[in-house]
Image (cartoon, rainbow, N blue to C red):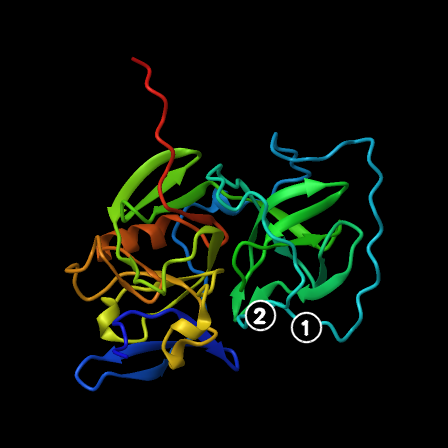
Amino acid sequence: MPFDRMSPYRRRAGWIVGAVAVPVLLVAALLIGQALTPRSTAPDDQNAAIADPTPSSVEQSLQESVPPAAPAPDGLPVLDYDPAPRGFPADPATMDTTPLAEGVHPTRRIAAYDAPGGRPLAFVEPTLAGAELTVPIAQRRAGWTAVLLPSANRQLAWLPPGGFDTVALRDQIVVERRAHRLTWYRAGKAVRSWKTSLGQSGQETPLGRTFILGRTPPPEEVYGGVDIYALGSVPDDPEAVPTGLRGAHIGLHTWQNDDELGENTTNGCIRVTRSGQRELLAEVRPGSSLVVVDQLPTPPSTA
């Protein structure tokens, strides 16, 4: 099977690995890049920690008691660039395009559970694959905080109180598969839109909420010389992608040309123009949410 000219990214022993096609030979070559490095030139105020936020979407009552956290065994896996462990719950609002305005940054190793007061399934650390980790908050209940799970699709992890800072997130990215359009929102208002290339048949760009995991340099010139954003999501069907991409993450990046924008030609990644990618890298910090939908609802007519 011909290898598509665009790839997600994966890590081996602390390194991010990409794969790029050789169209003539129809084979994939593994290319090792640097670890994710979450750089941003956006204003410092977007990184400010905020104390005890209680947004209107939070499901939390002051009268509720906080279920205790069961002790976490030392042998639990650590959430990393590899696929997340099984057992975490589905995100019940994965197609919701309401902006997620807060994130969690662990300040130490903390346990992630399958429910408030439930089973510990993995540890979360302050960094993941060399990048400072910030994960968007999806829900609060009974004193616990649910976050989008890294290295998985459409799943949540529940965190008990303590061991993390809460960070303001002002940006969101919405990708519409049918329109092949990416729109950047700030504080709920659309800022810019770009045409995109998305996943080909059988390797479609995964639907649902995810987030920007971190930033890595381009492994090859075909990426247009612009840094790549690796996302928290992975291919829905890892067996459908070329062998060199098994266990890979979905990426947001540019390409050496814009010939295929508006088409389904990638292995699941999201491709934009070089100028668009540079603007997103400069303005949108890692941890910001990204949601992929087939199409946005049509607003009701006001006529």
Image position of 58 (left or right of 100): right
- Tell which residue pokes out farthest to the top in this image: 303
Q: Nearer the viewer, residue 252 or 1?
A: 1
User: In the image, what residue type sits under mark 1?
Assistant: Pro
Which quadrant is the C terminus positioned in?
A: top left
SS class, disc 1: loop
Lateral position of residue 265 relative to residue 37, left or right: left
Mark number displayed over residue 77: 1
Residue 144 position, x and y percent, is 73, 46
Q: What residue does disc 2 label?
A: 80
**Vertical arrangement, residue 257 with respect to residue 175, above or below:** below
Where residue 70 sits: x, y (%)? 84, 59
- Residue ID at (62%, 63%): 126
Q: CA distance from mark 1 to mark 2?
A: 9 Å
Q: Residues within 10 Å of mark 2 (few under 14, many from 20)?
A: many
**Residue 183 in the figure: left or right of residue 210:** left
Asked if the residue at tag 2 contacts the one at tag 1, i.e. Cβ–Cβ closer than 8 Å, the answer is yes
- Residue 71 in picture, x, y percent from top left: 84, 63
Quarter of the image for residue 55 reads top right
Residue 180 or residue 108, whichever sits in front: 180
Say if 27 sits above or below 265 in the image. Answer: below
Q: Residue at x 33, y 15 (%)?
A: 302
Quadrant where the N terminus lies? Answer: bottom left
Q: Which is more toward the observer, 70 or 239?
A: 239
Residue at 78 percent across and 55 percent down: it is 118
Amino acid under disc 2: Asp
- Please tell me how crowded label 1 is: few (under 14), some (14-19), or many (20+) other residues with Cα within 10 Å: some
Q: Which one is nearer the viewer's eye here, 65 or 235?
A: 235
Mark 2 falls on what kind of element? Answer: loop
As drawn, the label of residue 292 is: none
Q: Position of residue 214 (x, y in %)?
A: 46, 62
Q: How many marks?
A: 2
